[in-house]
Image (cartoon, rainbow, N blue to C red):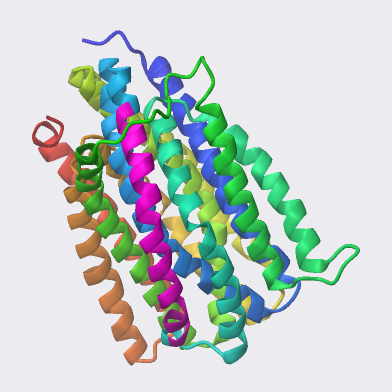
Amino acid sequence: MSSYSFKLRSKKILNIAIPAGLNSLLDIGNIVIGFFLMGKLSEFHIIAVGLGLNFFMLLYAITNLFFVGTNAQISRLYGKKDYQRMNEVLSSMFFGVIILSIPIYIIAKLLYSSYFTWIGVDTTSQLLGEIFTDIIIVSIPAILLKGIIISSFSATGNTKIPFYIKTIITILNLLLSYILIFGILFEPFDIVGIAISNLIVSYIELIILLAFLTKKDIKLKLIYFFNINLLKKGISIGLPVGFERAFTIISLILISKFIASYGSEDLAGFQIGTRIEAFAFMPSFGFMVASMALTGQYLGANKKDLLKQFIYTTIILASIFMGVMGLIMVFFGDNISYLFNKGDRVIYSSTMYLLCVGISQIPLVFIFVLDGAYRGAGATKISLFINTISIWSIRILPMYICLKLNLAILYIYLIILIETVIRGFIFLYIFRKYFDDIFK
């Protein structure tokens, strides 16, 4: 039996989860900065940036593919202390993504205009959204390559370096966005300003991350090495995650389309609510990264007896954090929403959304932590199966029925609550029943 106490397990988990969660929190902070500044201009700007980012989120399906494919391989090799092979994986994934980012950018360039037309928003929002999206998709190579490096750091349990870098980048983005949007000593760039700012800081962050890989005290190194089989292995591990993320993001976009039929004010409220909720996601994301990294490391070190203890400890810690975040959304959702827009209907839509998702935060913990464990074990098809079936059968289909019946928007948000609770307990049931089969 392990000598790890609950306190020691908690410390190890939090050392990974807190910086990873804060790093992602700053990612969301960059987005919310944009929403806050766009809210000073008009509701059209909020909708444009929100829908533009939803389109851009499709990229994160691909980012997740490479992130998990890299993390699952490197965490096991790190657990085995095979550092040479670890760096061969990092380099193969990195150089492979450089090549693959080119066709990904071209596809995004060809599709974004059709996406805005399909959503069916007003002409002003669509025009602004297309201007914004045309600029930020240029950052696609940087986004993908950053994901490879951050995943590698996370796999070794070193989440502090990406967090420190992200802190600097967030401050820079805030200053640069404000200067470019509203203009200081020159004409304001409006929505173009925030797009240019995000583009610039993405490449600056990539350069800083690359610089850290050259430090002597860091075992991760980018070497002149490329093995297509390692790239293929990473893609094969991450592909179910990529599909799962794609289906999930498409469902989010479809929900935006559903809500757009209620009117621009409800859509603006939904966009604000989802961005506020994203702050609450970040602790869960940090614990998911910890679960993924520790699963790979302990499987690689052949210490399966410790793994189950760490996963349950992660669930307990994450539930405490997310329970608090849920209470904040339930009781203070209207006050927080008011910071972004003062329209009564906008505030109502945002507040009702936050109420429903706030209640579902504990079941959401099961999804995040156990999803991370399955990914760390390379069992990515489990999450694909559960998430895809649950979201599309228990969430999207009932929403579509509500829309056809002209039911109030509150029913749409209640469906999100019910589906999250059901999916969370499905994740927990499968983990408890099939642990030995999954974590081989």
Q: Nearer the viewer, residue 272 or 426?
A: 272
325 in magenta: no
Quarter assignment of residue 167: top right
Q: How many marks?
A: 0
Q: Position of residue 48 (x, y in %)?
A: 58, 76
Question: Residue lying farthest front?
Answer: 224
Tell me, yes or no, if residue 107 can be seen here. yes
Tell me, yes or no, if residue 348 can be seen here. no
Residue appearing at x 52%, y 45% in the figure: 24
Quarter assignment of residue 296: top left
Q: Nearer the viewer, residue 387 or 123?
A: 123
Residue stretch rendered in magenta on the structure: 88-117
Q: Nearer the viewer, residue 61 or 259?
A: 61
Question: Residue lying farthest left?
Answer: 437
Q: Up-down: is 210 above or below 194?
A: above
Q: Quadrant of the C terminus?
A: top left
Q: Quadrant of the N terminus?
A: top left
101 in magenta: yes
Q: Up-down: is 18 above or below 39?
A: above
Residue appearing at x 18%, y 18% in the figure: 302
Q: Is residue 167 shown left or right of residue 302?
A: right
Residue appearing at x 23%, y 41% in the figure: 228
Q: Up-down: is 395 above or below 294?
A: below
Q: Main secondary structure of the magenta part?
A: helix
Residue appearing at x 30%, y 74% in the figure: 396
Q: Is residue 338 shown left or right of residue 400?
A: right
Q: Position of residue 245 (x, y in %)?
A: 32, 58
Quarter assignment of residue 39: bottom right
Q: Position of residue 83 (x, y in %)?
A: 32, 18
Q: Position of residue 200 (x, y in %)?
A: 64, 54
